[in-house]
Image (cartoon, rainbow, N blue to C red):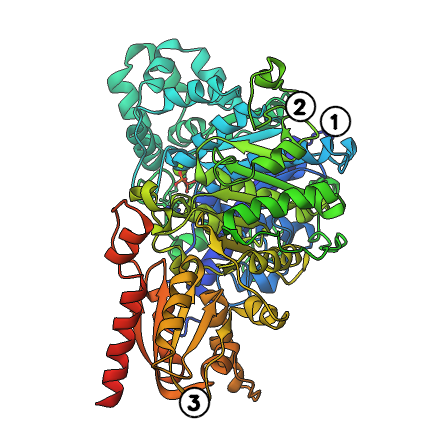
Amino acid sequence: MLKPVATDIDALKILDERLRWLSAWTIHHANHIRDNDDGLKVGGHQASCASMSAIMAALYFHALGANDRVAVKPHAGPLLHAIHYLMGTQSREALENFRGFGGAQSYPSRTKDRIPVDFSTGSVGLGVAITLFASLVQEYLTAHGWLDEADRGRFVALIGDAELDEGNIYEAIIEGAKHDVRNLWWIIDYNRQSLDATSADRMFERFDEIFQSCGWRVVELRYGKRLKASLDANPKLKSWFEGLSNAELSALHYQGGAAWRNRIDAEVGKPAAAFLKAHDGAALAALFTDLGGHCMETLVEAFDAAQDDIPTLFIAWTIKGFGLPFAGHKDNHAGLMNPTQALGLRDSMNVREGHEWEPLEGVGENARPGVEALIERSRIAREKRDRDFGSVSIPAIPAPPGEEQSTQAAFGRILLDLSKAGGELADRIVTTSPDVTVSTNLGAWVNQRGLFRRSEMADVFAREKIASAQKWGASNKGQHIELGIAESNLFLMLAAAGLSGDLFSRRLFPIGTLYDPFIARGLDSLNYACYQDARFLLVATPSGITLGPEGGAHQSINPPLIALGQPGLCHYEPAYADELAAMMEQAFRLIDDPAGESTYLRLSTRSIQQIDRADDSWRDGALKGGYWLREPGSNSEAAIVAMGAVMPEALAAWDELSEDLPGLGLLAVTSPDLLHRGWTAAQAKRWTGAREPSHVESLLSRLSRNAGLVTLADAAPASLSWLGGILGQRVAPLGVEKFGQTGSLADLYAAYRLDGNAITEAAAELLLQNGQ
Ligand SMILES: Cc1ncc(C[n+]2csc(CCOP(=O)(O)OP(=O)(O)O)c2C)c(N)n1
Ligand SMILES: [Mg+2]
């Protein structure tokens, strides 16, 4: 581990105060000084920042090494900006424009902030857990020879105490224990307040046990040096103090010296008489605020003492709003100082009017060189990392042979072939799955490439010569990270692995598999992964009611709609194996492309007759979101529009109907998401001069303006019904709107109206309307 730099406690204390001031002023400026044209609340969290300024000063100007990465609790964003402002890497303009368009973001953002942000935060709990998965990725890269020991770092999460209610944190530490994670520091800003009020007292005693049982060291920083000395000298006072509930403690911090005196006098009495005599009101208030998370000596000592790689939870006691007029008030979460209070703070911090933004304003001449030297010595990255980490050549991916196949089986086959062929892409692929590796057809790949574990895990069944198709041994050279059933962990794993280029300058190609309906279980984590531009391939299978007899709760209906609304994720739903091969090739390219994105493949276990292709002309359209599987006649009056696993029904209906409806087309939609995006993008472009029609407009303009479209998907009908809005054509939408029935495919398609009869009836209705 890196040796800590020589400490300079006084300079760190000054930096703590500078950070508290600059964060408070940044928020004040945005709310009370900057013009507000629309009268909308700007907001910001002065109390949440004040609570952690000492912790962040100790970290950024003392403890962090050059390779350490930090997830900062969302509401402490202004502190991170202030740190970079002190280092000269954040501009005053961005601070003045905090929460404004193009200004410093409300919550730290990897992609939108100009300063280096290691992990975006905002949705509480997720920023905490991603650090654990990033440390696992670090292990993976080192074990595979892609990251030198010297370039390894520690992963730090700065956590609000109320974040500990988020279950995803516990899912993560359980997974972390299985994988023996290390090099983690999670630091809780234990101010005992959440958004609504003070937090419940009951859980606190439990947190250390929970973490310890997952292999963590727990370090409680309850007292600062001065308070500890006073309380140790007076056991009665100490036990009284430790008996205060969270709400009582916060209220006392808010009320100040006189309240402390009255309560101690009334409740401790004589044993505290000398103590009370020795402290006036101001001294009492100051002493009781000397909690561990505000005491620089305590913080520095604790960080210096935890230089091994054991995952460590620091519980740093703090006061929400420390040093501000509303310190400890239960309603202070979004509380803002009024202008009078802000000016009062300014004066108390020796900041001259008109000099509020000066980085070291109020710092005496004597102290300045020491403070400047400490800022200079900070080892954290000043600038955003270079995103140029080279590119990987993506080979052409051929379609797996087979007259009849399902897209899920084809997926497994493609990965197996890639593995056997070898090469850079295959070596950079890392797969992961929450206990559905075998049932999503990753098994053959895992047989080839093995499970990843930091330490060797024997394949006991193989050793005992018990017949099994699945090898299940692990080594640190394996390429599959097996997770327990926790879909949020899957997405955080994909997020961390999908940022490996940005974090470690080595691009991985992560592939995660799960059952399609369970995307919803991890949805916020998926959104979180996309929000920070992590790159991965998500393979969701099986999907829809095409699952058949397994049915019921495993049916998925709305994921294509989720994908329609999810930025940073391209949805493809292939019907055929050759489409899938093209899409996987594209997905790998999008992972590698600096301007790319992640891909979601919605696959099926239904084995269907593959299609004879005359040429490759379908391919370009399939990658853009759709192509004519059966070309429409000129100015045709009708088309069937189908997606994915129900293509055989669409083809059969086309065969039957086209006798009566010459010119009937069959449009294979491969991505409603891309079609919709192309449509809106083309529309937006028209206002800036370009007049290119979108792909979907080109496809649909082959039909007459009042043509009827029968849309068909094993998904919510709204996935495709919007196509009628493009040129004003009429739509009969077929799809699935209810859960729960199991049965054979024929039964289910009949019951849910996804069969030939339904298509015929829908087409007839449309044409009747046409005739009217
Ligand atoms: C998933 C999620 N739910 C709700 C919120 C709204 N929210 C923001 S902060 C907060 C409470 C924060 O309390 P704590 O974590 O203790 O932070 P601090 O006291 O340091 O401000 C809540 C509920 C959120 N940001 N994310
Ligand atoms: Mg809190």
Please name the amino acid that badge 3 sits on: Asn
Q: Is mark 3 within 8 Å of ligand 1?
A: no
Residue at disc 2, secondary structure: loop
- The residue at the point 37 percent across, 56 percent down is 338
Label 3 or label 1, whichever lies nearer to me, is 3
Question: Which residue is tagged 2?
Answer: 307
Residue at disc 1, secondary structure: loop
Mark before the other along the chain sequence, 2 or 1: 1
Q: Position of residue 640 (x, y in %)?
A: 38, 73
Q: Position of residue 436 (x, y in %)?
A: 47, 36
Question: Which residue is tagged 3?
Answer: 635
On the question of residue 645 being in view, the answer is yes
Marks 1 and 2: in contact by CB < 8 Å? yes
> Pointer 1: residues within 10 angstroms few (<14), some, or many (20+)?
few
Please name the amino acid that badge 2 sits on: Gln
Mark before the other along the chain sequence, 3 or 2: 2
Q: Position of residue 50 (x, y in %)?
A: 47, 42
In which image quadrant can residue 273 be found? top left
Locate residue 269 relative to residue 78 in the image: left or right.
left
In the image, residue 160 sits, relative to residue 211, either above or below, namely: below
Q: Position of residue 704 (x, y in %)?
A: 40, 88
Give the camera-side residue of 239 and 540.
Answer: 540
Question: Which residue is tagged 1?
Answer: 3
Mark before the other along the chain sequence, 3 or 1: 1
